[in-house]
């Protein structure tokens, strides 16, 4: 997943900022590992715990070695949530601010949400009482993608757009990335990564039913991604004013479909995944256009793909889940299940929105969030140059 994000984000920015965005994507894994090991995993899955948060296993203290594989898989999810934000803030966020928000998201904001949804005693997972009312998010539509998307939205608003992105009347100017091949390669790697991302969320392959759940997750993921890409392609060509085949929009539509189906990919039928993916493509186009309407600058459309797709997935999961989906089981239990997912999405939005406003607002007030205009205009590569000997054949 990190390799995919690296190529996609590098291809989406200008040459002068390529090294800077690659540095942040690489460090998402390293910083995320340290902060998640120290405090993130303890807040998410530490024992003892309560329905709101865990509070054990800090720095792996008194943690069983049998939980190491669980830590690794969950750390990758945490790093992904943080990488979503780095793409949305590309080409103008200060490196010091990046380090601070990376630690905050992987160390606290994301872990608390994952505890609510995936920990054994999380309040969203367990519902208000009856066992049939539980929050349905198998592979992170809310936990990973909504969290990353909300953080990206709040940060984009506080950080402001890149210089020259919008005219005085609010109309957007195109700032094109420097490499469509890199962007496309990154997307293809991400498509493949999603198969492991979703299929691996079963966390077991030896119990009865594991193989079916994993295979269903993989197939639902590729079906939803395919329909998301194709619907986006056709709408952009024949409905939107663009009237052309757009590789970037097609890629983002496919990614949104995969994001949306995460919540129920293990149980949804293929036709349900097709519906969710199709709606994902439409959701991406709608949210991406709203972002532009409000003069928010998101170089990789992270808000449209991850917040739009993640929110859609949380709301669609109780409708298309094969075992208790509302479209297949018209009863009070299914209605209550949908309402509980909607309430959970609202709670996650409020939690991430408030904390991210405090985080990025504080960085802005401290004048730490954005680079100086001169640095932005010149390019942020200079702080990332690899030191090499000065010679006559390689002048500075």
Image: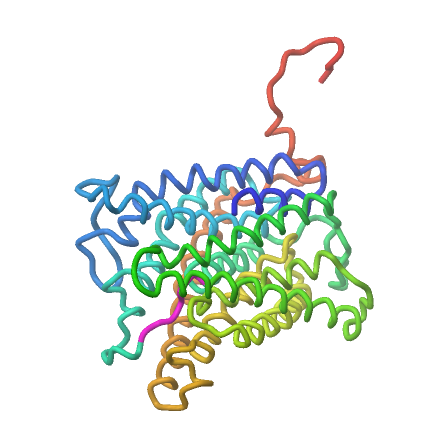
Question: Residue 295, percent across and down?
Answer: 67, 62
Q: Residue at x 46, y 58 (%)?
A: 198
Question: Residue 88, percent across and down?
Answer: 59, 52
**Is 3 in front, or is 223?**
223
Picture quadrant where residue 135 is located: bottom left
**Colour convention of the picture:** rainbow
Name above or below for residue 373 compared with residue 144. above
Taking 70 as reference, is 157 left or right?
right
Task: Give the mark count.
Answer: 0
Taking 276 as reference, is 342 left or right?
left
Taking 254 as reference, is 95 left or right?
left
Query: Does the segment drawn in magenta span residue 235?
Result: no
Question: Residue 49, percent across and down?
Answer: 20, 57
Residue that protrudes farthest toward the top in the picture: 392
Name above or below for residue 115 compared with residue 179. below
For the C terminus, the image quarter is top right
Q: Residue at x 56, y 42 (%)?
A: 3
Q: Which residues are magenta?
A: 134-140
Question: Residue 89, percent across and down?
Answer: 58, 49
Query: Does the segment drawn in magenta span residue 135?
Result: yes
**Is 290 in front, or is 235?**
235
Q: Residue at x 79, y 62 (%)?
A: 245
Main SS, magenta region, reads loop
Picture quadrant where residue 370 is located: top right
Name above or below for residue 231 compared with residue 388. below
**Is 57 in front, or is 364?**
57
């Amino acid at each position: 997943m990190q390799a995919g994000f690296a190529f996609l984000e590098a291809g989406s920015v200008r040459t002068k900022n390529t090294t800077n965005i690659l540095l942040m994507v690489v460090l998402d894994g390293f910083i995320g590992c340290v902060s998640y090991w120290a405090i993130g995993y303890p807040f998410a899955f530490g024992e003892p715990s309560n329905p709101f948060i865990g509070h054990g296993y800090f720095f792996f203290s008194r943690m069983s070695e049998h939980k190491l594989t669980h830590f690794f898989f969950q750390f990758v999810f945490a790093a992904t949530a943080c990488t979503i934000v780095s793409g949305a803030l590309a080409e103008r966020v200060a490196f010091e601010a990046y380090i601070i928000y990376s630690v905050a998201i992987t160390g606290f904001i994301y872990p608390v949400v994952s505890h609510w949804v995936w920990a054994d005693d999380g309040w969203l997972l367990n519902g208000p009482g009856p066992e049939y009312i539980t929050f349905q998010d198998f592979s992170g539509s809310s936990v990973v993608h909504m969290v990353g998307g909300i953080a990206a939205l709040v940060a984009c608003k506080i950080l402001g757009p890149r210089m020259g992105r919008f005219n005085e009347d609010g109309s957007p100017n195109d700032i094109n990335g420097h490499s469509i091949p890199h962007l496309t390669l990154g997307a293809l790697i991400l498509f493949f990564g999603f198969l492991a991302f979703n299929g691996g969320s079963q966390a077991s392959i030896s119990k009865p039913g594991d193989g079916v759940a994993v295979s269903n997750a993989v197939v639902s993921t590729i079906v939803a991604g395919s329909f998301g890409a194709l619907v986006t392609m056709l709408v952009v060509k024949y409905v939107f004013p663009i009237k052309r085949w757009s590789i970037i929009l097609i890629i983002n539509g496919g990614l949104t479909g995969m994001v949306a189906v995460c919540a129920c990919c293990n149980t949804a039928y293929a036709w349900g995944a097709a519906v969710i993916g199709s709606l994902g493509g439409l959701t991406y186009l709608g949210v991406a256009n709203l972002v532009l309407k409000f003069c928010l600058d998101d170089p990789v459309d992270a808000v449209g793909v991850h917040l739009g797709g993640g929110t859609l997935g949380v709301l669609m999961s109780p409708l298309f889940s094969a075992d208790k989906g509302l479209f297949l089981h018209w009863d009070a239990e299914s209605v209550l299940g949908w309402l509980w997912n909607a309430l959970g999405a609202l709670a996650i939005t409020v939690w991430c929105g408030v904390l991210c406003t405090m985080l990025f607002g504080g960085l802005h007030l401290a004048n730490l969030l954005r680079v100086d205009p001169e640095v932005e205009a010149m390019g942020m590569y200079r702080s990332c140059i690899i030191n090499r000997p000065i010679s006559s054949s390689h002048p500075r």
